[in-house]
Amino acid sequence: MNNVHSIVVKNLSKRYGSFHAVKEINFEIKKGELFCFLGPNGAGKTTTIKMMTGLLEPGSGQIEIAGEDIWKNPLEAKRKMAYIPDHPNLYPKLSGREFLRFIGSVFEIKQDVFEDRMERYLSLFELFERADELIESYSHGMKQKINICGALIHQPEVLFLDEPTVGLDPKGAKTLKNLLQSLCRQGMTVFMSTHILEIAEQMCDRVGIIKNGELIAIGTMAELREKEGKADTSLEDLFLELTGDTDMKQLIQELADDKERVEK
Ligand SMILES: Nc1ncnc2c1ncn2[C@@H]1O[C@H](COP(=O)(O)OP(=O)(O)OP(=O)(O)O)[C@@H](O)[C@H]1O
């Protein structure tokens, strides 16, 4: 059992047929850390998260979540974690409250503790008045919010989120950010993928950048800046530099200067 690290990933790889989507990645995430996982489209973020959450079998490697091997002891590991995917798969014929009560019963949360916690989460995400309506009648953002409530209601030690702010309005996104930061201060560990670099820069203790299935950088913002020798660089510029997209500006200019457009 590793008390310091909530997540340990060793030599993790995955192939889809002959395509090598994740290549021998290694990292450790400390208890209470808020970690952002970044990378261009198709870099391997979702594949990695699905392997870490027990949804996709790794080609090789080991994954330990809160001291449990997710593939050797899946039940023990899953009891201690939660996963919020980018496209939630909910039960449309349950109401919001029924859905949360279902999760409460699966995790065997004491009735009075559960009811109190449920009402607090429903209020926080402004779902209180719609909580008895069927989930199928919810908007995309409301579905995302009830999914977040469901993930947090059993107080997981480790929370995985894939693009969590997609579909949330600015207030919902801010609520989630503040909540995650508070929960991490109390010892929950967050592993989150996002394309919104502002979120990563504002919130995360450390970031990891994956490109073509390889973990090409990992560290605090200060460590990444120092490594790249760029004291005042934004995460956006560091990201573009590290992922080799710096010629993007030139490509945009070339498209804008396209002879036929200019001549029209
Ligand atoms: N089931 C699959 N079969 C074959 N290839 C796949 C499959 N799932 C993902 N891939 C490929 O693996 C690579 C990594 O995909 P993945 O979804 O992990 O990327 P991602 O970093 O999450 O991308 P995005 O930011 O676009 O969501 C991509 O090239 C993708 O096309």
Image (cartoon, rainbow, N blue to C red):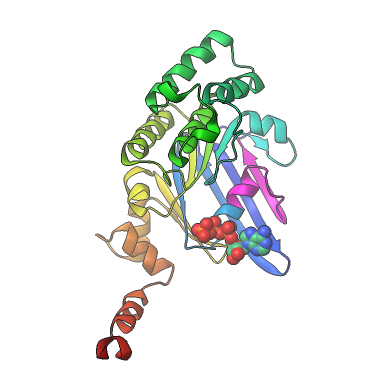
| Residue occupying image coordinates x 54% and y 38% | 5
Residue found farthest to the top:
112
| Residue occupying image coordinates x 31% and y 75% | 249
In which quadrant will I find the C terminus?
bottom left
- Is 190 in front, or is 106? 106
Q: Is residue 264 above or below residue 140?
A: below
At which x and y percent is residue 34?
43, 40
Regarding residue 67, the answer to whether it shows in the image is yes
The quadrant of the picture showing ligand 1 is bottom right
**Residue 61 lies in magenta, yes or no?**
yes
Q: Is residue 130 left or right of residue 50?
A: left
Q: Is residue 172 above or below residue 163?
A: above
At which x and y percent is residue 146?
49, 31
Q: Is residue 100 above or below residue 72?
A: above
At which x and y percent is residue 173?
36, 39
In which quadrant will I find the N terminus?
top right
**Residue 183 lies in magenta, yes or no?**
no
Q: Which residues are magenta?
A: 48-65
Residue 180 placement: quadrant: top left
- Is 242 in front, or is 83? 83
Regarding residue 23, the answer to whether it shows in the image is no
Q: Is residue 244 above or below residue 45?
A: below
At which x and y percent is residue 109?
59, 16
Q: Is residue 131 left or right of residue 78?
A: left
